[in-house]
Image (cartoon, grey):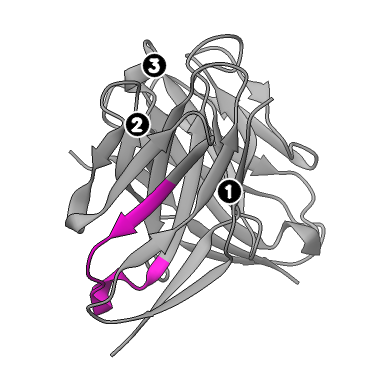
């Protein structure tokens, strides 16, 4: 099993450009998440998808959109990138059915710089 | 409402000495609690988790944490630090019921430095 995979690993954008971060999991998890990590802030939830066909906003959704393409894939789109979106982005997945199964598994991250 | 406070942003220890990383939480219901570790330029790895079974939880690499409901704490300890333990550690709380089931709430992290 590859677990959670993310592409690309690194990206540099100019202000105003758009891009999509891709995430896929092969663990048959029903829930998927996008976080951003900034120094001294921990991880903050951008959007999540509790199950295929549903998406919800997290703590910091402004400037982002998501698509749960199928059970395996969950993409994050920046329509018009801003320097404030320079961050490390992590995708995660979990089986959310009972309390003991809500451990999340994380991808390796995408390091995004917006100039 | 759920929240996590990691009481130290940086902790420095000498190799072979004990490690204590402190975490307090608030939660509307009985929570699940986790510690994740992040080595430089890596993703997050689960260290250990508490899900209402034993209050003393053992994790990987010799770490353990004790859930103390009366103190709303979940401190992470290790008897003897190793150089490879140098990393950032995140305390995390998750609700076990309700509309936010499964969502994680992260502390701001504690950077552990281990001196030779």
Mark in front: 2 vs 1: 2
Q: Secondary structure at mark 3?
A: helix
Front position in the image: B109 or A84: B109
Left or right for A38, reference A16: left
Question: Which SS class for mark 1?
Answer: loop
Can marks 3 and 1 be said to lie on one chain? no
Residue at (35%, 21%) from the top-left corner?
B52
Q: Which residue is mark 1?
A: B107
Q: Mark 3, chain letter?
A: A
User: Left or right of A107: which side holds A45?
Assistant: right
Name of the residue lying farthest toward the front: B70
Q: Nearer the viewer, mark 2 or mark 3?
A: 2
| Tags 2 and 3 on a common chain | no
Q: Between residue B84 and residue A7, name the one nearer to us.
A: B84
Left/right placement of residue A63 relative to residue A55 reads right
Residue holding disc 2: B50
- Residue named by callout 3: A99
Residue at screen point 33% across, 36% down: B49
Neighbour tally class for label 1: few under 14, some 14-19, many 20 plus, Cα within 10 Å: many
**Residues in magenta?**
B75-87
């Amino acid at each position: 099993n590859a677990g959670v995979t993310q592409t690309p690993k690194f990206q540099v954008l100019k202000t105003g450009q758009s891009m999509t971060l891709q995430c896929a999991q092969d663990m048959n998890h029903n829930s998927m998440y996008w976080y951003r990590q900034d120094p001294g802030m921990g991880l903050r939830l951008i959007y999540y998808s509790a199950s295929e066909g549903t998406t919800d906003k997290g703590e910091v959704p402004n400037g982002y959109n998501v698509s749960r393409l199928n059970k395996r894939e969950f993409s994050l789109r920046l329509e018009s990138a801003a320097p404030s979106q320079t961050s490390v982005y992590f995708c995660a997945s979990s089986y959310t059915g009972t309390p003991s199964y809500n451990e999340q598994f994380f991808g390796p991250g995408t390091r995004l710089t917006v100039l | 409402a759920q929240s996590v406070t990691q009481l130290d942003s940086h902790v420095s220890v000498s190799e072979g000495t004990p490690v204590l990383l402190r975490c307090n939480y608030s939660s509307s219901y009985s929570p699940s609690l986790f510690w994740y570790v992040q080595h430089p330029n890596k993703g997050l790895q689960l260290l250990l988790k508490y899900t209402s079974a034993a209050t003393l939880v053992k994790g990987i690499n010799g770490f353990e944490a004790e859930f103390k409901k009366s103190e709303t704490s979940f401190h992470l300890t290790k008897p003897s630090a190793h150089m490879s333990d140098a990393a950032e550690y995140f305390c995390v709380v998750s609700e076990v019921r309700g509309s936010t089931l499964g969502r994680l709430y992260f502390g701001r992290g504690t950077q552990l430095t281990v001196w030779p």
